[in-house]
Image: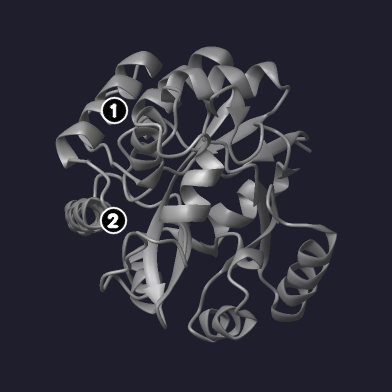
Amino acid sequence: MVVGKADLHNHTTASDGTMSPATVVARAKAAGLAAIAITDHDTMAGVEEAMAEGSKLGLIVVPGVELSTVADGRDIHILAYYPDCQDNKWQERLAGLRATRGKRNEMIVERLVQLGIAATMEEVEQIAAEQMRAGGGTSKGKTIGRPHIAELLIRKGVVATMAEAFDRYLAEGGAAYVNPPRLHPFEALEWIREAGGTSVVAHPGLYGRDDLVEQLIQKGVQGIEVYHSDHGPEEEHRNAELARRHGLIMTGGSDFHGERQGKVFHGEIGSRTVDLAVLDQLSNKR
């Protein structure tokens, strides 16, 4: 039996992480992991580099992506594992999600300007490019997200920390929060199925909507991310029981985004893991 631990939720410079795919893989190897999944937001641009580094270091790299969806005005993220990266329709759909994400970024910046904060998308794009170069990443297929806007707010002295930027402006309820129409999670499940992947509800404990998770289960989602850096013991227990009751795969991961201002977001690589056997479950459910 193959043994070891896997961290199945990690971000790189291909989206809003601060470290290149190769660096993230090397960090996972140094942490003693046997496998890691690369799950950037709405892009698989970092997977090829990560898999190449994994081959060199003897670490399994699971190809994945975290899809941005909205249901009842609430952000719901769906993880896809092992989709066919060569599927043109799948890649076109991911490009469409990135375009919607770009529109959302523009709307946030417009809201900031209305609040009297001098900000432009050009400045946000410059920060994203700087972080990409610093992390050694690639710009092809890269996504820009709220952490890049948060960094701009810090540089302008509007806020002192990333957490303050989200609390005051960017998170749900914040002064500049916007949520335009986006892909519905039910449709995301169908996209993942058509691309030959396995679907998992990301960090369900953050939504406060167990009814939505139940609806996703009824629509055929194949797994639940039980273990996550922002889940406490209560969330882990509740979602583990839910997964057991419905015979779903129980996954877990750190949701590592790298370091900003010397602080790791959301958790360090390897801080939340599952047994390597879960990879077989994800692969067999395809």
x, y (%) of residue 238?
79, 72
Residue toward you, 33 or 157: 157
Q: Would you name the residue on which mark 2 appears?
A: 115
Question: Disc 1 to disc 2, how far (Cα)?
Answer: 21 Å
Residue 140 visible in this rendered orientation of the protein: no
Q: Quadrant of the N terminus?
A: top right
Report crowding for label 2: few under 14, some 14 to 19, many 20 or more residues within 10 A (C-alpha). Answer: few
x, y (%) of residue 2?
75, 35
x, y (%) of residue 263?
61, 28
The amino acid type found where label 1 is placed reads Ile
Which residue sits at x=78%, y=62%? 236
Q: Secondary structure at mark 2?
A: loop
Q: Secondary structure at mark 1?
A: helix
In the rendered structure, the answer to whether residue 19 lies left or right of residue 212 reads left
The amino acid type found where label 2 is placed reads Leu
Which residue sits at x=37%, y=47%? 146
Q: Which mark is residue 284?
A: none
Q: Which mark is residue 127?
A: 1
Residue 234 falls in image quadrant: bottom right
* Nearest-to-viewer mark from 1 and 2: 2
Residue 148 visible in this rendered orientation of the protein: yes
Decide which of tag 1 and tag 2 comes sooner along the chain. 2
Count the labels in the image.
Answer: 2
Q: Is residue 200 above or below residue 62?
A: below
Report crowding for label 1: few under 14, some 14 to 19, many 20 or more residues within 10 A (C-alpha). Answer: some
In the rendered structure, the answer to whether residue 99 lies left or right of residue 80 reads left
Which residue sits at x=42%, y=54%? 169
x, y (%) of residue 21?
43, 25
Which residue sits at x=70%, y=33%? 270
Tag 1 near tag 2, CB within 8 Å: no
